[in-house]
Amino acid sequence: MSRIGRKPVQIPKGVSLELQGNMITVKGTKGSLVLEIPEGVSVKLEDGVANVERSSDEKSVKSLHGLIRMLISNMISGVTNGFEKKLEIIGVGYRAQVNGSNLNLALGFSHPVEMKAPAGISMEMDKVAKNVLIIRGMDKQLVGQFAANIRKLRKPEPYKGKGIRYVDEYVARKAGKTAKK
């Protein structure tokens, strides 16, 4: 049995979990999230605790057991606290500007890059560090995917360190060419 899947999910005060058929809805202070439970996995709700159970020991069902438990746990922490990713923009002339749900990036291309944030995602520039973009939302997968799409525009390069990277990301630097003697 999956060690992660076996653990019960505690439902804190202010969060409601509803189960309708194979759909689970989590509602909290920040909003609500919906998840479809696949075949072979079931969720039991009893006095403030959700338990994820599986019907068989097939490999595909075993792999879903821990996944569904963690998705429910992430949904609960998303509707209570939310998730955030911080991206650092490094490079001469590289800058970002947030206008509502639109993000305008100047990344050294011949044109500015414009991106529209999906529903449920908010963005802002850090007031202390001017080159840090903060992405917030209650859906962990959506926040991570949007941050990855922004990072993909200019990955950090190893020679000068220019590009877009996560704040806690380490980029190994390489030595450039040395001049002839």
Image: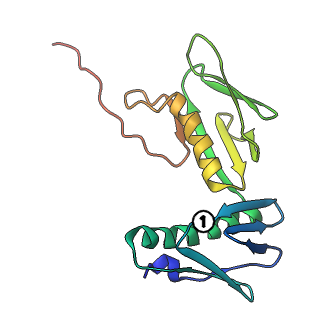
Query: Residue 63: x, y in percent?
Result: 44, 68
Looking at the image, is 90 positioned above or below residue 28?
A: above
Q: Residue at x 56, y 69 (%)?
A: 68
**Which residue is under mark 1?**
71
Q: Please identify the quarter of the rendering in which residue 153 is found.
A: top right
Image quadrant holding the N terminus, namely bottom left
Q: Observer-nearest residue: 31 or 85?
A: 31
Q: How is the image coloured?
A: rainbow
Q: Is residue 165 left or right of residue 32?
A: left
Q: Observer-nearest residue: 116 or 53?
A: 53
Query: Residue 123: x, y in percent?
Result: 74, 41
Q: Observer-nearest residue: 64 or 49?
A: 64
Query: Residue 103: x, y in percent?
Result: 71, 30
Q: Looking at the picture, which amino acid does disc 1 mark?
A: Leu
Q: Residue at x 50, y 73 (%)?
A: 65
Image quadrant holding the C terminus, namely top left
Query: Residue 162: x, y in percent?
Result: 48, 28
- Element on which disc 1 rests: helix
Density class for disc 1 (Cα within 10 Å; few <14, some 14-19, many ≥20) is: some
Q: Residue at x 60, y 23 (%)?
A: 94
Q: Is residue 92 left or right of residue 76?
A: left
Looking at the image, is 89 positioned above or below residue 57?
A: above
